[in-house]
Amino acid sequence: MSKAFEIKRPAFLILGAPGSGKGTQGKVLGSIPRFFHCACGDVFRSLDTRTSIGQRFVDYSSRGELVPDELTIELWKAQVDNWRESHVYKPDIDFLVLDGIPRNVPQAEMIEQFLDIHQVFHLSCPDRSELARRMRKRALKDNRIDDASERVIQQRIATYEAETKPILEYFSHGLVTDIDATQPPVKVLHDIIGKIVSLPVFKDSAQHIA
């Protein structure tokens, strides 16, 4: 095990269907001192394909195949190590805010070897038509026309339901907080922060760094 993970690091997980606002909330939280936002997309975008682990990723992605769970978590660990070694992420005082990872229960089981997940924030949006509207709007804004198709949108929602949503059951032992994702983003953030500051782990950390 790498030195970065000899002690389990405190973390929060933001979970929700595509279009629920995970990335938005994660980025805002990550801009607050003592919170470090770690998005799955950032991990893969930061990947050095010249390394052996990067080449393993390329081997799968170049064939259009899904990256295995074990390799996904290995890539994640390597990138968090890089952030730590460059002092961007300070594990002794920072809370990790995970967004987009883990993607399924096996990944959640693996990631718990290295992290203490103190709360899972479920951004709930039962109205799937609203999710589809948000996803379509974002795809068009980012000029990703193909991602705005109804087929792609419904497939992404179905994948979330089948693979990612069961993580809520895995962490069901008092760790899940449901947040109404249909609220204005600032109200969603208010609800998330309100829960975080009430947690014993946050109160303890605030005393140590005060």
Image (cartoon, helix red, strand yellow):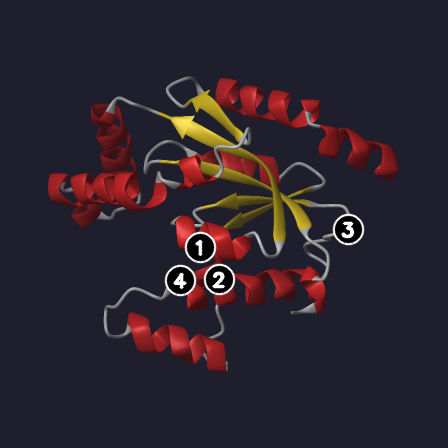
- Residue 77 visible in this rendered orientation of the protein: yes
Q: Which of 87 and 92 is in front in this view?
A: 92
Q: What residue type is labelled 3?
A: Asp
Mark pair 2, 3: CA separation: 21 Å
Q: Nearer the viewer, mark 1 or mark 3?
A: 1
Q: Position of residue 184 (x, y in %)?
A: 43, 18
Q: Nearer the viewer, residue 209 or 145?
A: 209
> Which label sits on residue 73?
2
Task: Tell me whether circle 4 and circle 3 mark residues in contact (CB < 8 Å).
Answer: no
Q: Position of residue 178 (x, y in %)?
A: 46, 23
Q: Position of residue 22 (x, y in %)?
A: 44, 36
Disc 3 crowd, CA 10 A, few/some/many (<14, 14-19, 20+): few
Q: Measuring 49% from the left and 38% from the top, which residue is drawn there?
A: 171
Q: Quadrant of the C terminus?
A: top right
Q: What residue type is labelled 2?
A: Ile
Q: Measuring 56% from the left and 25% from the top, which residue is drawn there?
A: 192
Task: Tell me whether circle 1 and circle 2 mark residues in contact (CB < 8 Å).
Answer: yes
Q: Which amino acid does label 4 sit on?
A: Asp
Q: What residue type is labelled 1?
A: Gln
Mark pair 4, 3: CA separation: 27 Å
> Which label sits on residue 107?
1
Q: Measuring 13% from the left and 39% from the top, which residue is drawn there?
A: 150
Disc 4 crowd, CA 10 A, few/some/many (<14, 14-19, 20+): some
Which residue is identified by label 4?
A: 69
Residue 38 as seen in the image, left or right of residue 81: left
Task: Tell me whether circle 4 and circle 2 mark residues in contact (CB < 8 Å).
Answer: yes
Precedes in sequence: disc 1 or disc 2 = 2
Mark pair 4, 2: CA separation: 6 Å
User: SS class of the residue under badge 2?
Assistant: helix
Which residue is identified by label 3?
A: 92
Q: Quadrant of the N terminus?
A: bottom right
Residue 66 figure quarter:
bottom left
